[in-house]
Image (cartoon, coloured by chain):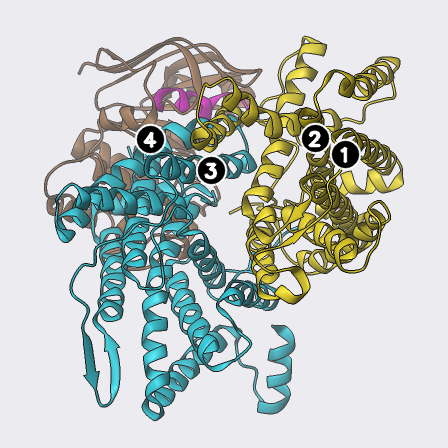
Chain colours: A cyan, B yellow, C brown
Amino acid sequence: MTAVVAALERRLWFRPSTSWIVPAALVGVALFLVVGSLRSSLFAQQTISGLANGGIYASLAVALVLIYRATEVINFAQGALATFTTYVAWQLMAWGLSYWPAFACTLGIAFAGGFLVELVAIRPVERRGSQITAVIAAIGLLILVEGSVGWIWGNQVKFMPAPFPSHIYNVGGVAFSRQDLSTIGISIAAVLVLWLFFRFTKVGLAMRAAAVRPQAARLVGVRVSWMLSFGWGLAAVLGAVAGMMAAASPSVLLQPSMMDGILIYAFAAAVVGGLESAAGAVIGALLIGVLLNLLGSYVSWVTPQLLLPVAFVVMLIVLLVKPSGLFGRTRVRRV
Amino acid sequence: MRLRRVTAASVAVTVVIAAVIALLPLTLSNYHRATGASVAVFFIAILALNIVTGYTGQISIGHGAFMAVGGYTTAILTHDHGWSDLPTLPAAAVVGFVAGVIVGLPALRFHGVYLALTTFAVALAVPQLAKNYPNFTGGTEGLALPTHSGLWLYEVGWAVAGVMFVIAWFLLRGRTGRAFRAVRDSEVAAASSGVTLAVYKTVAFGISAAMAGVAGSVYVLVNNFVNPDVFGLTLSLYILIGAVVGGLGSLWGVLVGAAFIQLLPIALTTSHISSSQSVPVIFGAVVIGVMALLPLGAANLLRVALHFGSQSRQSSDIHLGTEGR
Amino acid sequence: MGVLLTLSDVDARYGQVQALRGVGLTVDEGEIVAILGANGAGKTTTLRAISGTVRRRGTIELAGRSVARKGPEATARLGVAHVPEGRGTFSELTVWENLRLGAYVRRGLLREDFRRVAEYFPWLEARRSQQAGTLSGGEQQMLALARAVMQRPRLLLLDEPSLGLAPLVVAEIFRIIRELNDREGTAVLLVEQNARTSLMTASRAYVLEVGRVAFEGTSDELASQDAIRRSYLGY
């Protein structure tokens, strides 16, 4: 990063503070996307569906950030939990419930599930062990939950009913699918609701307090351990939203390993944004979604199998240039 | 982690265990001998992971990828180029070492959590790469290899395991070993005491990956088959679990861990306690339980039993390096 | 005036280290009591024992109810506001959010409380959206007090409120403490190294030494005994 700044310094006669480079770059990217979309309908379509994918990744990424900020645990099981809740929704629909009521029930079940998981699986581990044991426990949880899905529902691909009949909107010669647009809308709504919750409600404030200063929070009467379980519940709800949207997407099949790849993209997004910033995670997710879609369409050697390695390389590059992510704070390690 | 002196007791125990391992196949069927060989595979893989995670404090959830690299080396050399089996093992080690250095170099910039994520992504990405270049790797269908008798596999597996064990033991006791432990216990202190941090970290990764590569080779020989899914994410996760359940940073824990991940599922299914579908569920639950009750792994249990002393609480041998929030 | 807080034969440990041995004290409703003593004497630990943030044994009663097994979340709900060493401010949150957190255990509308707080600390209103960590040391201490006021506690535990602050600021803070005590009737248990100012504010004091109560008495008594003043109170 300093090398880039130094190079710019030589060119511009003033020293740009590093803090505006990232927003400037983002604005540049946004302009690029808009101009490209105006000039090519394929570009516009791929951008929109890229944003839709990004919305899915964003929901999962925010869930990861939520849990990481509250408990400093990387929840490797987030994707598996999302898969589980999606199967629950499938089951509800198989039993006769229609889509949106099933969706709503699933969110409630997801909250309860996340809450219980923290209570039963994570809290005992955190009390006894260090951070790494919590991470290992999360991995154990991943295996357990993904195994449960296979055990209860079997490994065959299942058919997930669609929320509404598919429809193509035609705007100026560009085709947008209703599915993509609703995914974008739902993701924005989910993240927005969460933000409002944290900003304006008493419980949200208590959760933030518990995350930044647990001891001080206890002194004002906040039951910190309940707040952590609550956080896991909320994260599970976000994961459920991501899972439902993924299942509705034509390129994703309902099977136990459904969210494995998406989890990586979500991790990449969270890491790119800086693990402690939800806004960063959202932006990172949208960027990754659009980038992968555009690469897949325009670069011939990028096959569907290569998308994951490509995402990985992107994550790697960002981490090498700015280790704390685009929006993270650089940690100074004092000797 | 305390440096155990070469006590008479530990030598005796080593000899006894080695003897048991050497004599065991006489009592086993061909099938079970092959199973014993897969325990050896995981022994080597967990040993490899221990070199990185247990002794240098860096965490890797991607060792399945290194096994893949070694395994495919063996498969391609024997299938396409007519090599015979055993010479491919050193080749796999070399390729593994290179891969380890390639991963280890950027890993220098990452700490704790970020490294875990990166290796997790590597574990998922490498099978995808294998699928993408089918001419080279046989793609999703994979490559089939000639079979071997269970006894041969067992002997080769455990011979290699023994060699690896000795290498690891010498590595971790000498100057390199002290350097590794210095890195783990305090990066900052190690850096200021003149240990060329970058070199040691990268070398650790390289050696670890080389070992994992050899494990992958033997794995391929045992299965006489290779395809991308063989080396999927689950493999990397199971290796980590074996290392942790056995006890990170402990050479004996490696044996316990390898036995755990290979034998427990088999024990569960054959005794009809559970169907094969539910094995991962029980596995995951056991892992969580072990983390909750015995975070330092089985090896710590042994240490406690031998010393009748207070169990070392809270201090895991590993820190993920996120100092101060 | 009844007795609000009773400690009797209280022990407390940090791991293997015994920090308090058989400490006993009382605080009446509406009183200001000081705990004095050298560093490491156990003053902070005593407050922690009351709010429940340290492992302790013994009798601790708040208005007749035992709180010896309760954690800080519960004691906060029983009317104890503990302002710890380092103030316990949420630096990452705004002034406004800190105040809201102060009232976490309270129900009902808080408008009345904000008004009262504004009376004591008029400058807070203008700084509502400022991040608490960017306030000066004295301002943070006052924010901590303001947060405690929001809680409407029966008992206020203050740990070294004057630490690191300039004399003028210290005087202001103690003035506010006295005012709080006068107007609201809040009992205050004050831990301080600054014995002189404490004895001017408190009516009674306990002097701790190595985890035990070495002396107790009214402020006048303690201030007038030269031997005690010089050996234990440092002036």
Element type where label 3 sits in the image: helix
**Gap between marks 1 and 3 measured at Cα:** 29 Å
Instruction: Check the image and report above or below for A28 versus B32.
Output: below
**Gap between marks 4 and 3 measured at Cα:** 62 Å
Element type where label 2 sits in the image: helix
Which residue is rendered at x = 32% and y = 76% of the image?
A: A48
- Disc 2 marks a residue whose amino acid type is Ala
Image side of residue A246 versus residue B189, left or right: left
For marks 1 and 3, give the one nearer the viewer. 1
Q: Main secondary structure of the magenta part?
A: helix
Q: Earlier in the sequence, mark 2 or mark 1?
A: 2
**Gap between marks 2 and 1 measured at Cα:** 6 Å
Residue at mark 4 shares a chain with residue at mark 1:
no
Residue at mark 4 shares a chain with residue at mark 2:
no
Image side of residue A237 versus residue B287, left or right: left
The x, y position of residue C13, in whole percent, is 51, 16
**Gap between marks 4 and 2 measured at Cα:** 82 Å
The x, y position of residue A178, in whole percent, is 21, 71
**Crowd tier of the residue under label 2, counting other residues whose Cα lies within 10 Å: few below 14, some 14–19, many 20 or above:** many
User: Disc 1 marks which residue?
Assistant: B153
Instruction: Name the chain letter of the residue that bears numbered label 3.
Output: A
The x, y position of residue A301, in whole percent, is 55, 76
- Disc 3 marks a residue whose amino acid type is Ile
User: Disc 4 marks which residue?
Assistant: C201
Stretch in magenta: C40-51
Q: Which mark is residue A216?
A: none
Element type where label 4 sits in the image: helix
Q: Which mark is residue A143?
A: 3
